[in-house]
Amino acid sequence: MNTGTEQFNVLSEKPVGSLLLQYAIPAIIAMAASSVYNIIDGIFIGQGVGAEAIMGLALTMPIMSLTAAFGAMVGVGAATLMSVRLGQKDYDTARSILGNVIIMNVVLGLMLGLLLLVFIDPVLRFFGASDATLPYARSFMTVILIGNVITHLYLGLNAMLRSTNRPQQAMYATIGTVMLNCLMAPLFIFVCGWGIAGAAAATIVAQLLMLLWQIRLFSDKRQFIHLERRIIRLRLRIVRESLVVGLPQFLINLCACLVAATMTRSLTEYGGDTAVGAFGICNRLVLFIVMVVIGLNQGMQPIAGYNYGAGRYDRVIGVLGRALVVASAITLAGFVVGTFFAEPFATLFAKDSPELVHLAAHALNCMVLMFPIVGVQIVSTAFFQSIGFAGKSIFLSLTRQLIFLVPAIFVLPHVFADPLEGLWHASPLADGLASVLAITLLLKEVRKLRARHASTL
């Protein structure tokens, strides 16, 4: 038993700074690579299909957020639960979590994909699709939804790799997906002539190939946590605990779906398809920065969860502090790019549409205004989730998305002389208010952790 558990004991022994680097760098590289592909994919679509395809692609964001919400609830929830159970040395439950992740992802992936496929046209119309953009959005999402179960399994097993002390393999899986995607997307779009559907097909095929590799990794019986027939059995307690812990991530993505739907409908009303396309371009940079911070969070969470479960509160505080510093540096870099290089960035997607480029550049200038402090808010939400405080994590998620951002989307267009200008300033207002709230809650929790640590000395 000692030999099999050495890989997990290091989480309570190795310096937290080194551990964070060990865990976070692969996750950051993986998330950055995935987000870079998201940018490259948009460039392929913009250059190979046209500006209207970029506008149609922007309308798929609410549905993508909705499917991601269910996948994250299972993957992130189970991964966090795995880290805590390993810290508590509850190895039987830890093994069963892997089997339950597979079952839950298959069930949810199939059900959600089929349901959305049936109602794809009315859903896209609800999100603001016009006669010009609907065919592009429908073509893209049909392929994505057909492969939804593949996406769920791929993301779920990647989360399991990270939580079982295999962050490098998780990184390889993501980078492998990106590389395959980048090879197949231009082939499917330009050579095969599949248009925007070709970009979606490249995504699903790449994920399928890396999913097969993940299954091979988890089939290795030399690994302490591996696939075996007896763990492929639904255990309601694990399902319930995984879903409860993953609920904050579900709500984050569900709120993102609501916000994206509200924003696209408002943009359609005040600025038409061009404004929707500009928002889609901006979101590619915003998503890149946020995903890099999420990669950092993925490195932090197993360390924080394990040490919290083991009662090592000084190490929990240590890894949190380092994560906050790195996250702030990342979001500050996003602020610099979005402020000083917005127009060159927008030109990558729509060089033949000056109106779209100009509007996207201006929107990006507005949307990154609060980026220097928003990293604290993103890390705080993940931190509370990693130590099992689902309520606080949910609260922080809801305040940014629902309590601050959605009202701002409705109110600010009536405050500014130009309604569209009000929409561009909704995000920075919500980011600023949510970050102040997150800092307040985090300071209180750190004081409690310090008190608990002092009581153990």
Image (spheres, rainbow, N blue to C red):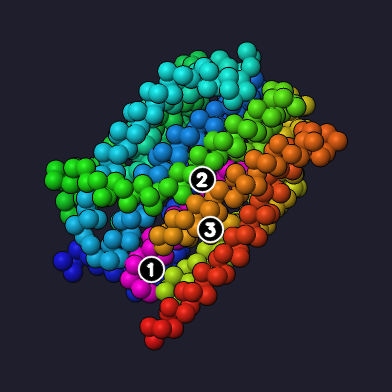
Residue 94 in view: yes
Identify the residue at horizontal 63%, vertical 54% (top origin).
434
- The mark nearer the N terminus, 1 or 2, is 2
> Dot 2, crowdedness within 10 Å: few (<14), some or many (≥20)?
many
- Mark 3 to mark 2 CA distance (whole Å): 13 Å
Q: Where is residue 30 in the image (x, y as percent from the top left)?
A: 45, 48
Q: Quadrant of the N terminus?
A: bottom left
In this rendering, would 123 be left or right of 93? right
Amino acid type shown at disc 2: Ile
Mark 3 = which residue? Answer: 379
- Mark 1 to mark 2 CA distance (whole Å): 23 Å
Q: Mark 3 falls on what kind of element?
A: helix
Q: In this view, does 287 lie above or below 356?
A: below
Identify the residue at horizontal 64%, vertical 20% (top origin).
52
Mark 1 = which residue? Answer: 308
Q: In this view, does 149 lie above or below 306?
A: above
Mark 2 = which residue? Answer: 252
Q: Where is residue 400 in the image (x, y as percent from the top left)?
A: 61, 49
Identify the residue at horizontal 65%, vertical 27% (top origin).
265
Q: Mark 1 falls on what kind of element?
A: helix
- The mark nearer the N terminus, 1 or 3, is 1
* Region of the chain picked out in magenta, as a range: 285-312
- Mark 1 to mark 3 CA distance (whole Å): 16 Å
Q: In which quarter of the image is the C terminus?
A: bottom left
